Image (cartoon, rainbow, N blue to C red):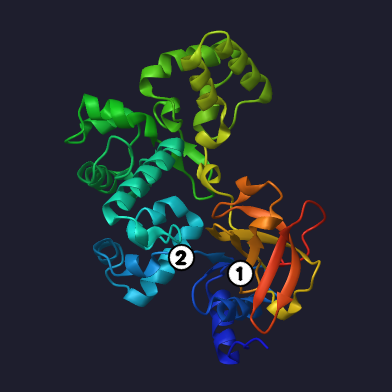
Amino acid sequence: RHLQPVAESVEALRALIARHAVVLVAVGDGMGSELAQRAVSDAIRGTSALFTVVSEAGASAYSACALADAELATVGIGERGAVSLARRVLDPLAEFVKVPPSALGVGMYQKDLKEADLTEALHAAVEDSVAEVGVDANSASAALLAVVPGLSARLAALIRARVEGEGPLRSRAELLGIKGIGPKTYENCAGFLRISGARAAGGSLAVLPDEPLDATRVHPEAYATARAELRAVGADVRALASGQPLSAKHAAQLRARAKAKGAEEIALAELLCDPLLTGDPRRLLAEPPALLARALCIDELTAGLRLGATVRNVTPFGAFCDVGAGTDGLLHVTQLRGREDVLHVGARMLVRVLAVDLARRHISLGLDDGGSNGGGGG
């Protein structure tokens, strides 16, 4: 049978959760995760707190690197990993860019590649992700700014120093006042750096940026066209800056006008119509993590049980999926029925338990195309 958490540890954890009004606990998916999940599950019982399982890939490598020394100088190496796990729940992209590419665990054949080639490919993938959603210039770390297309680590550090030393940037144009950022660099990076307004204590925008379109991914060179198109359909540019998406009517009108003009206008219309590019972009990169109220035990699983699953690793013969039982189940490639496209790390899906081997702690899974989620407590 499964191990039981130490009662004293559960009580200590429960006291910490109560003292700090904790609403969410991040549990790493490495060695001992099953027991840790069970301990957290016991500790939050009877509260409104939840927990989620987070990838530990590269956490130890980050803990011992120079960047962690600078960010968490007074925190022990062991505790730095915990800080990194918690940050990965809040903003995965901003945290994973700090991890050396070779420590990410990106596939079973990773060690067969030259490290230089792997680093170059992973850096390009990160740049593409950042370019897809952009970053908030005032809140992004120097590590995240450094992978913005058009910026270097030196320029990223200068932007961070400007924000920390003189306060938030009020417009993209203020980037030109930072030493080292000339017209050409500004032209290359401006469209990827959003300038959001100042927020009040409750999270609502208290002050809009000087130029409302600075809060979007529209490049400054296209501002005049963007304003003209928004005026033509009667949309308020200030609403975009405050994170309010265009109405369905205005979006449809913008897209119709763009379709009649050309490719550049279509691309501009999509930037104006996509609400995630004016607000929180994280959902573009990955689904939110599964939030759980209790941990399952492998001996609770029975054939036919429907569960929500998150893909943790992909192999040529299938995918290993976290179903909240502390042991990953195998979704064999023969169970995919032509739906191999769903297999990528982080993908969420409904699965059905096919078989459980308690002696070997093996869980066999199949895709489930209907029915309700039968477990996980989320």
**Is residue 196 at all visible to an observer of this figure?**
no
Taking the image as shown, residue 61 lies to the left or right of residue 155, namely right
**Callout 2 environment at 10 Å: few (<14), some (14 to 19), or many (20+)?**
many
Reply above or below: 177 against 136.
above
The N terminus sits in image quarter:
bottom right
**Is residue 125 at all visible to an observer of this figure?**
yes
The amino acid on which the numbered mark 1 sits, given as a three-letter code, is Asp
Taking the image as shown, residue 332 lies to the left or right of residue 215, namely right
The amino acid on which the numbered mark 2 sits, given as a three-letter code, is Leu
N-term mark: 1 or 2 = 2
Q: Which-is-in-front pick, marks 1 and 2?
A: 1
Q: Secondary structure at mark 2?
A: helix
x, y percent for residue 173:
30, 27
Reply above or below: 338 against 84.
above
x, y percent for residue 198:
43, 41
Residue under the image location 67 percent in, 25 percent down: 248
Residue under the image location 58 percent in, 57 percent down: 289
**Callout 1 environment at 10 Å: few (<14), some (14 to 19), or many (20+)?**
many
Residue under numbered circle 2: 85
The C terminus sits in image quarter:
bottom right
x, y percent for residue 282:
51, 46
Residue under numbered circle 1: 328
Reply above or below: 30 against 130.
below
